[in-house]
Amino acid sequence: MDYVIRPIKASEYPVLEDFLYQAVFIPEGVKPPPKKIIDEAALQVYIKDFGIYPDDRCLVAEIDGEIIGAVWTRIMNDYGHIDDETPSFAISLYKNYRNKGIGTEMMKRMLTLLAEAGYKQASLSVQKANYAYRMYLNVGFEVIDENSEEYRMLYRF
């Protein structure tokens, strides 16, 4: 499968709404929530005013001119938040493109960008039941904290 990973264009920022919804983990057999769930403050922290802050970064995966995935980071007060110098990750792919190595490559490229920008670490949170947890471990994140539902993970450069 031929795909391109590239920086997002400012005109494409609205696609982050769709990818934020795609990033909501839905366990097997559970009915997906309505798309308006992304309007909740706990989720808006990932995309509201994206691109106006200096720590906002986003890469997209594209096939034949269509964006099929996004990985973005920003300093935000989510469960993955460590401090005001550590960007938190969000990543999402359309279902048809998952488990093909695209997400792993997107993560690696974003980690490279963050290292080149001088960050010392990056963080994320993931639900314990989410299969993506293994991918995060494979690219070098480690669990540093947890609650009953989620792991908080850290990558050190």
Image (cartoon, helix red, strand yellow):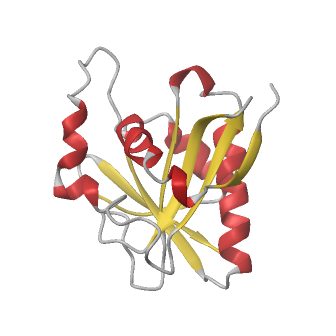
Q: Is residue 69 visible?
A: yes
Residue 104 on image: x %, y %:
68, 44
Q: Residue at x 66, y 61 (%)?
A: 110
Residue at the front extreme, as displayed: 11
- Residue 18, position in %: x, y? 40, 38
Q: Quadrant of the C terminus?
A: bottom right
Image: 99 above or below 13: above
Q: Quadrant of residue 147?
A: bottom left
Q: Residue at x 43, y 74 (%)?
A: 52
Q: Is residue 5 left or right of residue 38?
A: right
Quarter of the image with the N terminus is top right
Q: Residue furthest right?
A: 2
Relative depth, front residue between 42 and 49: 49
Q: Is residue 157 visible?
A: no
Residue reaching furthest to the top: 29
User: In x, y percent, where is residue 143?
Assistant: 47, 60
Q: Return the x and y of residue 111 as percentages of the image width and height.
A: 67, 65
**To which quarter of the image does residue 130 belong?**
top left
Relative to the observer, which residue lies in front, 86 or 130? 86
